[in-house]
């Protein structure tokens, strides 16, 4: 289980390394193009609900992987993730681990 830390304002978001390796490419592609977007995830086990953050190129982002080497990249999965993000303007993290594989 890797971690995604955005703006150091909250505890890191725990994300499966297989999802995180794909997120790294999707997020970096959007931010490199100066394209901001919304990202949403469950707030955690202690607090029900959801958190959303506006992803912007000027805000620090740190990705930490537990696995070495990182999982393999699936180009079809990347394409589905990017299409979903571009269509909705939002990246919903908890939809990526299950939905994404069956899409």
Image (cartoon, helix red, strand yellow):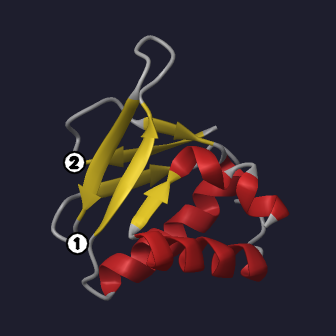
- Check the picture and name the quadrant holding the N terminus: top right
- Return the disc, 1 or 2, that comes first in the chain's sequence: 2
Mark 2 falls on what kind of element? Answer: loop
- Residue most toward the right? 102
> Which residue is disc 1 drawn over?
57
Above or below, 78 relative to 7: below
Q: Position of residue 31 (x, y in %)?
A: 32, 77
Q: Position of residue 84 (x, y in %)?
A: 56, 72
Above or below, 36 relative to 45: below
> Which residue is disc 2 drawn over?
7
Above or below, 3 relative to 55: above
Question: Which residue is pictured at 53% across the width and 49% down the height?
Answer: 93
Horizontal side of 53 relative to 98 (left or right) equals left
- Check the picture and name the quadrant holding the C terminus: bottom right
Query: Quarter-wise, where is residue 34 in the image?
Result: bottom left
Question: Which residue is pictured at 22% across the width and 72% down the height?
Answer: 57
Question: Which residue is pictured at 62% across the width and 62% down the height?
Answer: 21
Q: Considering depth in this image, is 75 or 37 the residue closer to the camera?
A: 37
Horizontal side of 5 relative to 45 (left or right) equals left
Residue 66 visible? The answer is yes
Q: Position of residue 56 (x, y in %)?
A: 22, 67
Question: Which residue is pictured at 51% across the width and 16% down the height?
Answer: 45
Q: Considering depth in this image, is 64 or 14 the residue closer to the camera?
A: 14
Q: Position of residue 67 (x, y in %)?
A: 70, 48
Horizontal side of 90 relative to 1 (left or right) equals left
Mark 1 falls on what kind of element? Answer: loop
Could you classify mark 2 by the number of other residues whose Cα lies within 10 Å: few (under 14), some (14-19), or many (20 or more)?
Answer: some
Label 1 – label 2 distance at C-alpha: 11 Å
């Amino acid at each position: 289980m890797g971690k995604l830390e955005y703006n150091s304002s909250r505890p890191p978001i725990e994300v499966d390394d297989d999802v995180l390796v794909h997120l790294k490419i999707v997020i970096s592609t959007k931010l490199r193009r100066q394209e901001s977007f919304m990202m949403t995830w469950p707030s955690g086990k202690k607090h029900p609900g959801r958190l959303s953050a506006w992803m912007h190129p000027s805000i620090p982002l740190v990705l930490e992987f537990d696995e070495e080497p990182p999982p393999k990249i699936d180009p079809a999965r990347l394409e589905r993730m990017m299409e979903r993000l571009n269509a909705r303007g939002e990246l919903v993290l908890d939809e990526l681990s299950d939905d994404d594989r069956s899409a």
